[in-house]
Image (cartoon, rainbow, N blue to C red):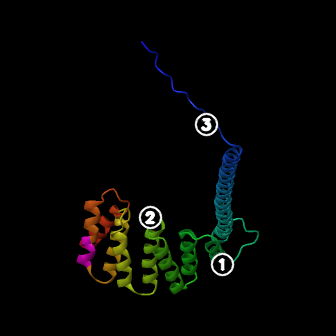
Amino acid sequence: MPKPIKKKIVKKTTSGTEGIGTLSRLKKSSEERKRFLITTGAAVVLSVIVIGGFFLYSNTQKNKAQKLKYEAYKIYYGLYQKQPVASEERYKKAAEIFKKAYGVRKSPVPLYYIANCYYELGRYEEALNALKELNREFPDDEKFVPLSYYKMAMISLKKGSAEEALKSFAVLYNYKTGAYKDLSLIESGKILETQGKAEEAKKKYEELIKDLPQSPFAEEAKARIERKKG
């Protein structure tokens, strides 16, 4: 039986020119990868610097605003003062510093205290403007927005506008947390009493007693109803 003929495998040889071309391509590819890594790395480092700088700036501004607010608090409440200062001067100075704090970093706190300062100074329009800005800029702040509506109602009463006060208390009554219904009811009842609307006032008091019996205003509401009966 004849033996099978084996095919001779011819090894492909790489010419010097082809070898140089391959090395050149590899080198070029390596350089491109290197450039890409350097560029990417630089971008990452730059991002870290920018983000880090932003947070550093943010924290710096926050700290600066906190210091200003603390200084304003001390003046507003007359704390740690070497010499007693007249109330009018205290409120004027406190308002100025609270304004600076708000300029450095916006938050509802300075605006609320600015309004309080103007309220104490009898500058009711300026107080209202500060409170309106608070409600406009920080509509979801559950601590200061309801307080601002209460203060707005008080300002309206000072200006002799009972109807505007009732509107502010209505907003407070319907506020999303429901935490100020009792305050709104008792204050609205008092206003209605002064307007000679005894029956409407009584309804406010009765609602308070029925729906919010644990309220600290419930006893006052009962006393007002009993007083009317007497």
Does the image show residue 40? yes
Quarter in which the C terminus is drawn: bottom left
Give the image quarter of residue 214: bottom left
Label 1 and label 2: CA atoms lie apart by 25 Å
Say which of 24 and 191 sits in front.
24
Label 1 CA crowd tier, 10 Å (few <14, some 14–19, many 20+): some
Instruction: Tell whether position 202 is magenta.
Output: yes
| Side of 132 relative to 189 (left or right) | right
Give the image quarter of residue 42: bottom right
What's drawn in magenta, residue-wise?
198-203
Label located before the other in sequence (1 or 3): 3
Question: What's under tag 2, amino acid-wise?
Answer: Glu
Residue that mark 1 sits on:
96
Task: Tell me the number on the disc at residue 116.
Answer: none
Residue that mark 2 sits on:
142
Label 2 CA crowd tier, 10 Å (few <14, some 14–19, many 20+): few
Which residue does the image show at 68% across and 69% down from the upper left? Answer: 68
Mark 1 residue element: helix
Q: Position of residue 5 (x, y in %)?
A: 48, 22
Question: What's under tag 1, amino acid-wise?
Answer: Glu
Residue that mark 3 sits on:
12
Question: What's under tag 3, amino acid-wise?
Answer: Lys
Q: Are marks 1 and 3 in contact (CB under 8 Å)?
A: no
